[in-house]
Amino acid sequence: MTGVGVTAPALEATQVSRAAGVAFIFKKAVISALVALVLFSLMIGIRTEAGPAGQLIYWTRFGDLAAMVATVFGGSIVVELLRQWWGPVDTVRIVPPRVQSTLALARRAIAPVLLVFTFLVPVIFYNERYILDLGILVLTYVMLGWGLNVVVGLAGLLDLGYVAFYAVGAYSYALLATTFGLSFWVCLPLAGILAALWGVLLGFPVLRLRGDYLAIVTLAFGEIIRLVIINWQSLTGGPNGVTGIPRPTLFGIPLTPADDGLAARLGIEFSPTHRIVFLFYLILALALLTNWVTIRLRRLPIGRAWEALREDEVACRALGINTTTTKLTAFATGAMFGGFAGAFFATRQGFISPESFTFQESALVLAIVVLGGMGSQLGVALAALAMIGGFELFRGLDQYRMLVFGLAMVLLMIWRPRGLIGHRAPTVFLRHSHAISSDLVKEGHG
Amino acid sequence: MDYFAQQLINGIVLGSIYGLIAIGYTMVYGIVGMINFAHGDIFMIGGFIALISFLILVSIGLTVVPVILLIVLLVSMAITALYGWTVERIAYRPLRHSFRLAPMLSAIGMSFVLTNFSQVTQGARVKPVPPIITGGYTLHEGSGGFVVQLSNVQIIVVVTTVVLLAIFTWLVARTRLGRDMRACEQDQTMAALLGVDVDRTISMTFVIGAALAAVAGMMYLLYYGLVDFFMGFVAGIKAFTAAVLGGIGSLPGAMLGGLAIGLIETLWSAYFSVEYKDVAAFSILIIVLIFLPTGLLGRPEVEKV
Amino acid sequence: MSGDCILTIDHLTMRFGGIVAVHDLSFDAERRKITALIGPNGAGKTTVFNCITGFYKPTSGTMRLTHDDRRDIQLERLNDFRISKQAKVARTFQNIRLFPGMTALENLMVAQHNALMRASGLTFLGLIGAPSWRTAEKRAIDQATLWLDRIGLIDRADDAAGNLPYGDQRRLEIARAMCTEPALLCLDEPAAGLNARESAALSELLLSIRADHGVSILLIEHDMSVVMEISDHVVVMDYGVKIAEGTPQNVRDDPKVIAAYLGADEEEAIAVMESGT
């Protein structure tokens, strides 16, 4: 019961400040409620709809409006109270050192534990199709996040059109497979190479641009690719997409109930789950390949040049580093991984359409990278798990889902602007590898 | 020739709308150095509020069109401005001195919030309105029977834009608020030391930008006769293109860029293909940024070594 | 000037719009010597550096670099990174430009980028972990270790560069420039912000760099104690033009230099100059 003795004075202190702040809190809540009333008056209070004859009709929803305003009022009080209780103290500093060291230990253990668990997911959840599908989805985003991390996290180049390379990979596989009948394993590298080529094609003219300009140009590029896919109907099937994309084979052995299928050859009973499990391990392998290559590249001169570029481009030039080719390689590498992921996406779905490659996807992947903590492989994996998993939790909310997602993005950025794992591990060391605090690490200007 | 003249008129009208949105981008970029990704959605909200207030006014029996227009204009400007203020307060102010990417992601998140907020509250279907302002003038009747027309809506859009731009230019050039804005644009710390309320000035920038976007939203509603929850995204990117084309940070530049984008889009649709009009607009953005990174009227940025 | 010159600046002019930052400047830097470029603030010294190191393209004039093997390179024809890569000119910056989020060791590894890129077979050999790459990497780490040892930062090799004290950062930036194995080292105010003891250590470091590595040094410096102690030749600039050059002694006694530094008040100027020695 010693805990009570320690916390009692602290409680008293907060109670004093709370008493002093009641008027303040109330005033703030009233203002918030008034603002909410004006904001929502027309948008929530009145619902418009196109009537049966094409004319516009409307009806009122003052009950909803009142409920929303009341929610804002109550929410404002709760937030303000929480803030006063919590105080301006940084959450990290509240945690005692012993807990922190345990946490550090846990952090070191988390990656291997996560990896082993991921390997076991198809075994543990063999009969739960939903979880397997979700796992595949999460891993796809982990891979996309790791791919984009090369561009944004390491090289510090803000790319808002990453989905374009995902689309190029997906359509490359879909079209090559449906037109020429090439197998997945031939198309996979081709999809990566084509995406990388597009990366270079885009990168070459735009990499002189800095910061937000680069962001907006990549966004425009992503939109151009999508619009071309929609409008070039003779090649891409336009908004209808490409159907009948071949499923992947286990190096030529199809995963079907047919006589030459895997199940028949192994002499076991066919189950559609085989294919799901196969896809799971396929994307896991692709994601781990991305991870392995990225970790390797970081320790090579090219990877160090990427990070140096993020830190200080002028200094890089003074050291004789060709910044243009360095940026291009980062762009192409990221694009290549995006292309691989796209090819996987196409083979998993069996059907692709431009709808899957909107700006929202780019924003989601970027959010994963930034939330993960730029440049941190583990952080990106955790962020992908949190984002996609969280997104799934709200599946029942249907159209509220994107609303919640947007709100979560805002709040997460305010809560942790530098992401979950905000420190950088050195690529080479003499004696000890100290993590470098995120306050020192730059995030690039390009 | 007649066809071209007609397209020119249409392009200028569309360009005025883009220009009004572009001003919001250019001001915010000038003062806080970030792309306000939610600005396109503020424009969309402005369109919705104009639609709803118009509906209410008509249903309570008001029939005098100029009065309706004036009330709708004021109401949508006021409420949308409050949206602009709230967005800044919630999503950007806590991150003002944070890392560069955080406000950008926060802005993208806010854009999703606004898009889906209006989808949830007003439904996903396109909302049509009957033509509010009808009539117009025939400028020229060609021999082939092609008529060059200037509708009253087009006149109203252009006149409103010009008037608002004039008021706004005066505001920035002559008033205390304008001076504070320009000071914050140069150096926020110094401005604060000299007694400028930086927070308030930045808030006001968002408020003014949102109010102008609301005007654009209303003009869009009048001109095209419809609004939908997704119209902010593409219009936003095009308006940003306009701001960049004109030289970001420059108000006349934003208007000029808006007109340029409007004309390019209209003429491209008229002479080449409607399907690729957005591709044309985005390609122009890329080309401009590559060959003219400071835009038409922007100041060159000197790299310090 | 007779003798063996590594760098010959000939009628260099740099205009920014209507402003002439450097006007018709000519001087030579001798091989394996330390040449100092001094002058009051705004005299155009850093602009000269930026022209030499390719950050600015001069309006007119030529800059010829002559390597040990008599190979001539016209610097004004190369741009940014090629100056360091091909002409072997390295530089430091007035306001230190390290990679703050990378460790001291990593900073020195980045400096060996071009050599390591070749050794890693443009990344592909490195990716598969070829033995030739491993040895090259080890050699690079040794080279970096050597420099860390020389500048006394071996114990802080694994600390972020941004966490090092100011004086250490200055030395690390010089070591980083040296890791590119330059023929000409351009230092922009290396002693700025250093205390007397650190300045003295810096002088020693620069002299030993010249002696051990045969590197020619071009130096911008305000700290007269450093300039007087280590320079072989001093070029004085004011308002973009050269107003004097010669040995440190000659320059120090030149009335034009004194006038440039402190207006017309010669006595005060002499006092300052002497306190510096």
Image (cartoon, coloured by chain):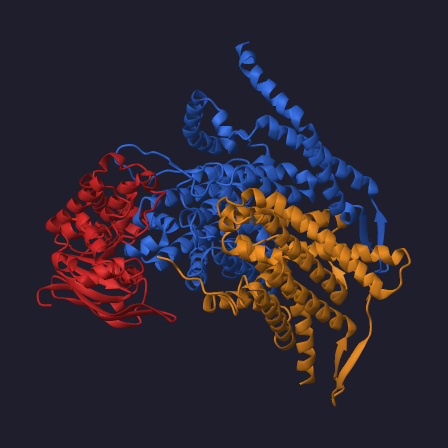
> In front here: B158 or A446?
B158
* Relative height, residue A305 to residue A26 (above, below): below
Q: Position of residue A97 (x, y in %)?
A: 43, 22
Q: Position of residue A176 (x, y in %)?
A: 50, 59
Rendered shade, chain C: red
Q: Position of residue C258 (x, y in %)?
A: 21, 59
- The part of the image, by quadrant, that contains residue A428 is top left
Lateral position of residue A299 relative to residue B2, left or right: left
* Relative height, residue C62 to residue A398 (above, below): below
- Judging by colour alone, the chain drawn in orange in this rendered image is B
Q: Residue furthest top?
A: A1
Q: Position of residue C66 (x, y in %)?
A: 15, 65
Residue at 55% over, 67% down: B246
Q: Quadrant of the N terminus of chain C?
A: bottom left
- Judging by colour alone, the chain drawn in blue in this rendered image is A
Q: Residue furthest right?
A: B61
Q: Residue furthest bottom?
A: B143
- The part of the image, by quadrant, that contains residue B67 is bottom right
- The part of the image, by quadrant, that contains residue B149 is bottom right
Lateral position of residue C260 relative to residue A413, left or right: left
